[in-house]
Image: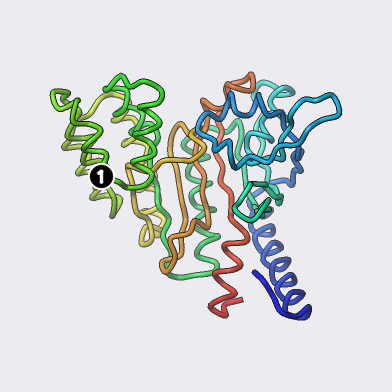
Amino acid sequence: MKFTNIKDELRYAEKRFKLKQDIERMVIEKGYISYEPGMIEDYDKYVAINTRSNRKAIVKVMNANGQISILRPDITSNLLSNLLPKWEKNLKIKIFYYEKIFKHSGSGIKEIRQMGIECLGIETIDADKEVIWLANDILSQYRKKYILEIGSSEYLKGLLQEFYLEEDEYHEVLTLLDRKNKQDLIRFAKGFKKNEAYEALVNLIDLKGGAEEVIEKAKKSYMNERMSKGLNELNEMVKFMKESGLSDNITCDLSMVSSLGYYSGVMLRGYFRESNREIIKGGRYDTYTEQFGEIIPAIGFSVEMDELLKSLYERGEI
């Protein structure tokens, strides 16, 4: 936000601080402990682990010894690189952070404020339920009309494994799915028409809407063991939300793709209904933790604080 006078800017900063305090209070009540991750990461290590990262957007800095470091473009990887080398068996932790990430934009370096939670070492289904509930609580705290959208990287990866794609082809499909570009997806997949999973792939973008309806529709299409596992996980979440009276704003998108590419289970995104900008994004990333030396159950999400504040401020709701 840009302001023409200091008073408006200070008033906006005050509202940002109050918003931070409100969400901080909510996560502390759920047993999360504050954690401050580092700001600097090694460039080569980061891009080796995060293969789908936009390298042009990464903010690089030169060390005194000539090596390239970066200002963190993502907090989860930074957090794991700090914690997992010291991980102890059967450890269970719930942490939250309020930090900035950094990206190159057309006008320079962009600082993006995020508040996030990470649930590490805790049994999968219990942590999934808690995290989705908390994401729902945060959205509903500020709007009655919102969308909490869930997807499954297991379902998606299970489908794509049927096509034996090269790495560049795999990333091309993910890009088309992320952009909801069905026409180009069909064009890309024309060489796979004899594959029994073909119809499931070209119609994947259409599997979006009411969670129960989407899951039932997907079950009638091609299915392998990994895809079935992903749908069962989603179905468990949908049942939980319905039984808890929290299902009115839940939708499902089986073509959901993360720009970071490290999720390995349930994924979630939260929006306000008048905007297509993400307020909340996250998911389960157990397999990603292996890159840091230890495989542990892990799930979390981040709240895009600047986007949340801007949306509320522009409508006079804060």
Left or right of residue 229: residue 130: right
- 156 in relation to 239, above or below: above
Q: Position of residue 294 (x, y in %)?
A: 62, 20
Question: Closer to the camera, 239 or 200?
Answer: 200
Q: Residue at x 69, y 61 (%)?
A: 20
- Which residue corresponds to the image point at 68% horizontal and 25% vertical from the top-left? 84
Front residue of this view, candidates 121 and 74: 74
**Where is the C terminus found, in terms of image quarters?**
bottom right
State the image coordinates of residue 313 (x, y, percent, origin top left).
59, 74
> Can you say whether 166 is above or below 269 in the image?
above
Amino acid at pointer 1: Lys
Residue nearest the observer in this picture, 226 or 33: 226
| Residue 102 vs residue 284, the one in the foreground | 102
Name the residue carrying label 1: 182
Tell me where residue 55 sits by quadrant: top right
Rendered residue at 66%/24% (across/down) = 44
